[in-house]
Each structure stands twice: as C-alpha cells, then as structure tokens.
Image: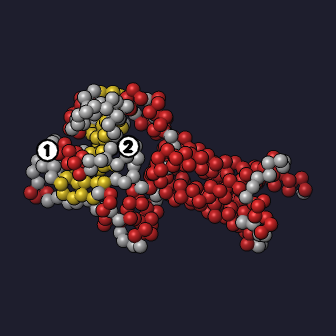
Amino acid sequence: MGFKTKIRFLHKWLGLISGLIVFIVCITGCIFCFHDEIKDITRKEWRLVEPQNKPFLPPSVLKEKANEIVPKNKTSMVAYYGKNRSAIVYTYSDTENLYLYFNPYTGRYLKTENPETDFFIIVEYIHLYLLLPDYIGKHIIGGATIIFILLLISGIIQWWPKRRSDIKRSFTIKWNAKWRRVNYDWHNTSGFYISLIVLILAITGLTFTYEWVGDGIYKTFNFGGDKAVETKLPVIDTTKFKTASVTAIDKAFIQTMKLQPKAEMFFVMVPQQKTDIVSTGAYPHTLRYDQQSNYYFHPSDGKLIQNQPFDKKTLGLQIVEMNYGIHTGQVLDLPGKIIAFTVSLLASALPVTGFVIWFGRRKKSKKRA
C-alpha cells in the first residue's frame, strides 16, 4: 500500500466510526450560534429592560429577593448583563438549578428559568455531552473531535493535487457533472476551504473536555509557564477571620465597577461558606465572554485582596480565557458568529457527503464482483 492509499484507508474508517457524532456536534453548534439573538426576540419581556439613569441595585438585594421566591435554593452568582438587560440570580438546590430574572434598577421580578427545560441549554448539553452523564459524554465527544482533526489532516493530504494541471480542478466543483461527482467535489472542496477555521473550532472545543488542551495553549503562547500558578486563588488567614458580612458582596461589586468603569457586564460569585472569598468579574462587552478582568475580596469587609485585570494577564491566559469567544465566534461579534454558523453547517455536511462517497464505491465494487 502506498502512502496515500494508507491515508485513504485511515480516512475512510475514522470517518465511518465518528461520522454520526461529528454530524451531531456540528449541527448543535450551528443551532447554538445565535441563541442570544433568538432569545432576545422570543423572550424580550424578561431579558430586556428600559435603561435608567441610576445605578444597579446591589447584589445582596437581588439575592434576598430571589431567596423569597425560592427559599429552598442557595445563590451561587448574581450577574448584570448590561444597561438594557435584566440581571440574573443563579440559584441551586439538591434537585434543580433555577435562574431568576430581575430588573436591575427596580428589583422587579421578571421570570424564573429552568435550564433543564430550556431548548438552547438542551442543545448545548447535546453538543457537550450527547445528553449522557458528563463524565461519559464528554469523552465520547472529545474522542470524536480528535478523530475529526485527524480526518481534516488526512483529507487535505488526499485532496492535495499531484500535478499543477490538477490545481484548478481541485479548487472547483464541476456542477454540470452527475450528482455523485458533484457530491465528491463538494466533499473535497468544501472540506479544504473550511479546514483551517474548523481546526480552530475543534481545538478550542477540546478545551471543554480536556484540561491539558487549555494548559497546552497556555504554554504555547507563553513559551512555558504554569497556568495553575497564575490562576491560583488568594488565601485568607482564617485564624483572624471575622464574621462574613452580607454587604461584602455589595462592596466588592461597587469596587469592581469603579475599577472597570467602561465595562458593560459584571458578575459576583456569592460565597458558599463563611471563609470563601468574594470573586467578581467584568467584561467590556455585553454577552461577550472574553477580555475578562477578575477581582478578589475579603468576605468579612469586602476589602480588595487581589486584582487581575485583563491587560495584566499573560498572553497565554488571555488566549485561554478567550477560548469560548473564539469557539462560538463571539470574539468577532456578529461577523464572527456568521462565520462560525456557516462553517459548522458546512462541516456537518462532510460526514454525510463522505458516507455517500463510501456507499457509492461499495455498491460499485459489489456490481463489479
């Protein structure tokens, strides 16, 4: 067997093994791309509010209001998504997670959302875990993604034209040919054109499954180093610890807004134990989860312990924290989402067109026999 024959054999069987999962991952990723825009249209009654010329209510107030509505649940985070958007209090219990929407200016209760019944969250869980337990599903998705990367590489090797005269033919689709030839050309040509972007989407997707991928990205852009050291949380002296203050999260939120006056989106993590520090985050753009600045405060008096603005982080950590934005196209706003959507849609067709090629050849060989 020659080199290209071996590559073709590998490409065929890897494609047959992973094709269905790759199709599901690409289609669900495609659907999820514009989930925020679709929800803003279909759920604007509780996602959008009228901007007011006054400050947001403190997180402790929204936390207390949420506690009145779902007294059995604990609050994990309070998030403010922008001047014209509702604030969300994230709560949990042993049986369920609930998201409570409030007007950030008046505190008016708007809606309770259960992520287990939300269409787009279900699509996201299919994308990440195939709706299986996460410790099983993520490895199936991760394995299929690694195989897909190998398929992209082996596909390019197969596609690469042998002669200069073949270059033009390799970059085009012969639309006036029979449908099997059009399918063959489409599989090869579309696979080549989207290969680089799909490769980026696949690698950034692997970081959600394997921590070592994120560590590898960190080390690559920093030429070494340890991500765990840079992201290590500060430790407080519990021997001199005073009683945790409810207003500590309010002080932390106010200070975060002062430290990042141009930021549009904020979150405050609510301590679950008395000795847990208060962590906050700020993003410069609404509904864009990149360029994150982090701050850490003492739970008793809300005093700033450690700050980590985005521009002070190493390049490696910046890239790792931009991973979600790169994977979903958010990092380039609407054009980026359109690119991610289009490429995911085209990538979902690759297993289908590849299967048609294999099935046609198999049928042809049977006839010859």
Disc marking residue 80? none
Are there few (<14), some (14-19), or many (20+) residues within 10 Å of tag 1? some
Work out whether residue 176 can be spotted.
yes
- Spot occupied by residue 75 in the image (x, y as percentages of width and height): 27, 39
Question: Which of the marked residues, 1 or 2, is nearer the chain's N terminus?
Answer: 1
Which residue in the protein does label 2 denote? 286
Residue placed at 73% from the left, 58% from the top? 171
Can see residue 133? no
8, above or below 341, in the image: below
- Name the spot of residue 346 as percent of width and height, x first: 64, 48
- The residue identified by callout 1 is 245
Q: CA distance from mark 1 to mark 2?
A: 29 Å
Q: Nearer the viewer, residue 191 or 114?
A: 191
**Quarter of the rendering occupied by the C terminus:** bottom right
Which amino acid does the dot numbered 1 rest on?
Ser
Q: Residues within 10 Å of mark 2 (few under 14, many from 20)?
A: some
**Measured from the top left, where is residue 100 in percent x and y?**
33, 33
Location of the N terminus by quadrant is bottom right
Tell me the SS state at disc 1: loop
